[in-house]
Image: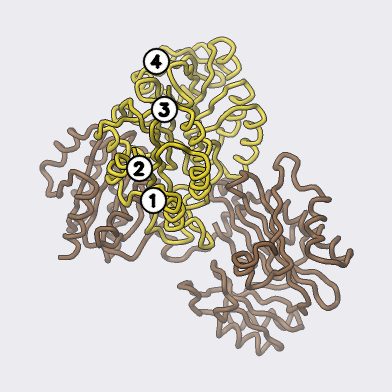
Chain colours: A brown, B yellow
Amino acid sequence: MKIHEYQAKEVFKTFGIPVPDGKVATTPEEAEQIAKQLACNVVVKAQVHVGGRGKAGGVKLAKTPEEAKQAASHILGMDIKGLTVKKVLVTRAVDIKDEAYIGFIVDRKSKKPLIMVSAAGGIDIEQVARETPEKIHKFVIDPIYGLFPHQARELALHLYDDIKLVRKATDVILKLYKAFMFVDSSLTEINPFVVTTQGETWAVDAKINIDDNSLSRHPDIEAMRDVTEREKKELDAKSKGLSYIKLDGNIGCVVNGAGLAMATMDLIKKYGGEPANFLDIGGSSNPEKVVNALNILISDKNVKSIFFNIFGGITRCDDVANGIVQALTRLDINLPIVIRLTGTNEAEARKILSKTKLIPASSMVEGAQKSIEIAKI
Amino acid sequence: MSILVDKSTKLVVQGITGRDGSFHTKKMLEYGTNIVAGVTPGKKGQQIEGVPVFNTVKEAVEVANANTSILFVPAKFAVDAINEAADAGIKLIVTVSEGIPALDMVRVISFVNEKGADLIGPNSPGIISPGETKVGILPGQIFKKGSVGVVSRSGTLTYEIVSHITNSELGESTCLGIGGDPIIGLKFIDCLKLFEKDEQTKAVVLVGEIGGSDEEEAAIYIEKSFSKPVVAFIAGLTAPPGKRMGHAGAIVSGGTGTAAEKIKAFESVDVPVAREPAEIINLLKKKM
């Protein structure tokens, strides 16, 4: 789960990481008020879950409260990479002399926490990582002992020559590690970590992604969740034990298992169709799940045909068939349904479905092809 | 021969008295798995499908000589259960549980490694050596003893692919799901090393998906040190970036971990990548 910059900065503050004063606003008037209270140059920043906000025009400097109001009215409602800006952070502007990068991730390769620092921080860090990876210093942390101060210092020495700055950065690195571990983050970063002309250090931007699997033990962070309309539907599906992601095609897919669900989407695309979604009904085979799955698909107006691809193992084919029959009686479904069922209790499932108008397919490929043909009509 | 599990596997089922634990105990016994013990704290003295239940894994090892464990415990209790198994001297721990936080796994894996145990999963369907034993939730009837090793990050997609291998008469030596999470125990490379040494295995099918760089690392290893034919399949060519596709580990982030990159990595080292599951057999036969 992603949280906004202003929320990540609240987390940083509780760990003693220096963050410029600021508040979040949802109207231009609020932004003006905050700028008045701060009584200094401010930066108005779009709060959306996507990178590249500055390049998209979502970050503006304002020298007066009036300018802050104008900036906010320009940014609020703006579309950044498909996301509408609903909140802005109004925060004290600082004189930037130097920009560094400090970030932590859970590294899949070493199976340990990994810290990355670079003296070449700022908006082009991804380009730095691609073109001059030697400018990014990495260190794998032993999760049992944690990050030692001398290790943090060694990294900070890559950032600055001035020992005073090295000490300040060491302190921030250690605090950021604590924050990263405490909130069960999958990625925590400060970019840029700024040194001002006066020699102050500030976390000018803040990013924290939280491991979805740990949210049950962080209700305070769960409460920070801000979802788009599209995500609402996905979360609603999740609460019903379904894993659903909406796409832009017209062939609805219902599959058991994430890998098979991805492979089904890929196959539809390979044979010239466009999948409308990813939908994994999971391992257990409660008929109610099938009803819920179909309910989600028929609410997507783009869907022209539905393809069930079920490989029965733990999932019993007869349970899925019963779910389909229940859905057909309870829901108003006019869409053609192509069904491929194989594995556990396949024969029973065929018997249950024999009285329905479903279109049978004997393989994944045949099912994909039939659902594509029908969607074209 | 086979890898990791065979007739000598003596299994303890952790969480045996639960709904999933007792159901799959029955299924594994039907397949012929030698289940010597079950563990549920506080349920010592009970029997599930004729299997004696103990309070601790330590007792299961000392009294019943268990050497392999499978966990059917909720994610919340899985970390404790894995650590307990490793501490008791279990050599192979199979974790079906889904939803364990990644930073918890980081610590667990450190401990498991220290104890010299191997971990499969979490979020794994388990492992089967057809005709020998089954440790997991995989449907036994679709497998057939043979010469192809299968290693996968998925469950049902593996079954789809295995059904083609079984129908082709090639059959499987050992088939395992290494799990759909970002932080897992055995990875593709670890399994390839074991398949390299296994005489029964004549070829390997590797089933990958988007997210991480395990497939790319496997490709480098195959080019350098793997002598048997390998055929791959990668799921998720059409997955949108930044979205977790069911599995916690199946996500394209910051432009890395895409299916296209992984396919390129394999094809550049002469590992053919099937564009649909059914193609795997022809690719295998060409290579074998």
Please identify, in this view, whether the residue under mark 3 or under mark 4 is nearer the observer: 4
Q: Which mark is residue B49?
A: 4
- Tell me whether marks 4 and 2 sit on the same chain: yes
What is the chain letter for disc 1? B
Q: Look at label 3 and name its amino acid.
A: Arg
Which residue in the structure is indicated by mark 3?
B19
- Tell me whether marks 1 and 3 sit on the same chain: yes
Q: Look at label 2 and name its amino acid.
A: Leu
Q: Look at label 1 and name its amino acid.
A: Ala
Q: Is residue A241 left or right of residue A215?
A: left
Q: Are marks 3 and 4 in contact (CB under 8 Å)?
A: no
Q: Are marks 3 and 2 in contact (CB under 8 Å)?
A: no
Residue at figure coordinates x 40%, y 18% from the top left: B33
N-terminal label among 4 and 2: 4
Q: In the image, is residue A51 above or below residue A33?
A: above
Q: Residue B157 carries which label?
A: 2
Mark 1 vs mark 3, CA separation in Å: 31 Å
